[in-house]
Image: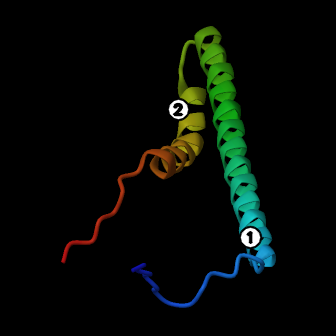
């Protein structure tokens, strides 16, 4: 006596959703591209800000006052805060 277990319908392995897989892959590639672009913009902005602060600090050393450095920080501080807040901000968790 043979026992057979049947659950649902037989599996037909000939049909696949190739178009859905391609769409998901393209969406993932777009997301990676956008993430790299955001990272490059953040690095570029940070590098330009640090370079401007270095130049202002050098001018301040020769000038004897650091008013230039203060002015550059007033412009660059909020930008650097936004960059750091975006990349190192806390994860929001919703409590029930």
Q: Which mark is residue 21?
A: 1
Q: Residue furthest left?
A: 96
For the C terminus, the quadrant is bottom left
**Image vertical order of residue 83 relative to residue 73, above or below:** below
Please tell me which residue lies in front, 24 or 72. Answer: 24
Which percent across, then down, holds residue 33?
75, 53
Dot in front, 2 or 1:
1
Please tell me which residue lies in front, 10 or 37. Answer: 10
Image point (54%, 47%), residue name: 83
Which one is earlier in the sequence, the residue at label 2 or at label 1? 1
Q: Quadrant of residue 42?
A: top right
Q: Residue furthest top?
A: 62
Image point (71%, 69%), residue name: 24
**Image vertical order of residue 9 relative to residue 67, above or below:** below
Please tell me which residue lies in front, 77 or 23. Answer: 23
Q: Which residue is mark 2?
A: 70
């Amino acid at each position: 006596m043979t026992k057979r277990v049947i659950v649902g319908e037989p599996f037909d392995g000939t049909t696949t959703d190739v178009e859905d897989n391609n769409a998901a892959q393209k969406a993932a590639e777009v997301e990676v591209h956008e993430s790299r672009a955001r990272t490059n913009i953040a690095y570029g902005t940070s590098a330009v800000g640090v370079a401007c602060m270095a130049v202002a600090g050098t001018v301040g050393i020769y000038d004897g006052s650091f008013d230039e450095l203060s002015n550059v920080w007033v412009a660059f501080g909020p930008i650097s805060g936004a960059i750091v807040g975006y990349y190192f901000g806390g994860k929001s968790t919703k409590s029930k």
